[in-house]
Amino acid sequence: MTNSRYEYVREFERENILLPETHIIIRVDGRGFHKFSDRYSFDKPNDERALKVINLSALQLMKQMPDIMMAYGDSDEYSFLLRKQCDLFERREFKLITTFSSTFSAYYQYYWNQECSDKPLSVERLPTFDARAVVYPTDDTIRDYFRWRQVDCHINNLYNTTFWNLVVKGGMTPKEAENRLIGTLSSDKNEILFEQFGINYNDEPEIYKKGTTYIRESIPDTTGSSELSKRQLDRLQKKLRKSEIKELHGDLIKDEFWNSRPWLLS
Ligand code: ATP
Ligand code: ATP
Ligand code: MG
Ligand code: MG
Ligand code: MG
């Protein structure tokens, strides 16, 4: 394109380049999914098909973006860990987050149509996702980030499981159930589930209690190198693209998960 006399307005544009050689985590979260899940009559507390839709979307994004080493999600959110040396969009924050949110939203709609064709999407309430990117300075903060999200998943799931049992099986109104749960500890909720409904929370499906994790397996040991030639970098991207992606519903809180997969943080 030739320059025009108007080109100078480009000078007003601003970029935020994320700190090099640090891990970036991008989290997407559904907009207004409380209402969305109402509108499309999700099963409560956990709609299996909706979980499948969000998981397929995350997996597809990971396949498309070889720089994603790991993803973790539950409910209407997903977090993606990019490798330390990732240079996707030259680490431009706005390009990264807008691409993640729009691509994720597009996949979600695609897989929704595939999995829930009996509940066609209405243009007045389409599923869309926001995104934020954060750089974390150390391996410990990365580990703690995923622990934070998994603890959040556990707390919400225990609450929702108890709440919906009180409403559906216990015959309470939502307001009554909410009041019943005010000030209760985890142990109280476990007890309500067991005493009133014969449910042992530990026996609930792992995918509900722990969320879903995708990890890239069999990774070349060059992911962390900062000095790669163009050719080496191309080869690395190719290998990452081909690497197997594994689905887990396990514990991210104990060190074991991290210690046995050092390449995730290399
Ligand atoms: P915001 O736009 O601020 O994110 P929100 O309504 O999306 O608002 P969240 O805190 O993100 O608020 O909560 C997501 C909601 O989506 C939860 O209330 C949860 O009940 C519902 N939800 C998401 N996935 C499922 C699912 N698979 N089954 C049942 N409910 C779900
Ligand atoms: P980037 O991801 O960097 O934006 P890009 O390939 O989208 O890369 P753009 O500068 O945005 O690059 O260019 C958009 C391209 O899309 C143009 O080359 C144009 O040819 C094509 N395009 C968009 N809309 C139309 C259309 N309605 N008809 C024909 N071509 C179109
Ligand atoms: Mg949300
Ligand atoms: Mg959410
Ligand atoms: Mg374009």
Image (spheres, rainbow, N blue to C red):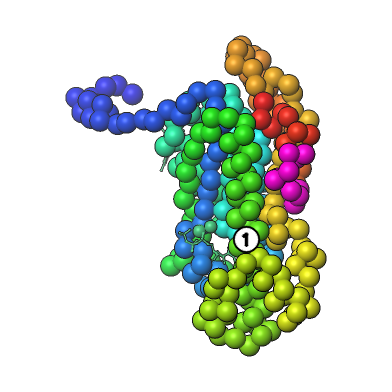
Q: Residue 176 is drawn in which quadrant?
A: bottom right
Is 32 on the left-hand or right-hand side of 52? Answer: left
Tell me what residue is drawn at x 74 percent, y 48 percent. 251
The residue that appears at 75% across and 51% down in the rendered structure is 249
Residue 239 vertical placement versus 127 (above, below)? above
Q: Percent position (x, y) of residue 233? A: 63, 18
Residue 71 image offset from top left, x and y in percent = 64, 43
Is residue 249 in the magenta section? yes
Magenta stretch: give its range.
Answer: 248-257
Q: Is residue 95 above or below residue 211?
A: above
Residue kind at label 1, given as amino acid type: Ile
Can the viewer see residue 107?
Answer: no
Give the residue pinned by disc 1.
Answer: 155
> Residue 188 magenta-drawn?
no
Q: Looking at the picture, does residue 51 appear above or below residue 245?
A: below
Q: Main secondary structure of the magenta part?
A: loop
Residue reaching furthest to the left: 5
| Whether residue 79 can be seen here | yes
- For disc 1, the neighbor class at 10 Å (few under 14, some 14 to 19, many from 20) is few
Say which of 209 and 74 sits in front: 209
Quadrant that contains the C terminus: top right
Between residue 112 and residue 88, name the one nearer to us: 88
The residue positioned 39% from the left and 31% from the top of the image is: 16
Q: Secondary structure at mark 1?
A: helix
Task: Please give left or right for residue 125 compared with residue 79 in the image.
Answer: left
User: Which one is nearer the viewer's eye here, 211 or 94?
Assistant: 211
The quarter of the picture where the N terminus appears is top left
Residue drawn 58% across the image and 30% down it: 138
Percent across and percent down for residue 96 are 48, 36
In the displayed structure, would residue 59 be above or below residue 220?
below
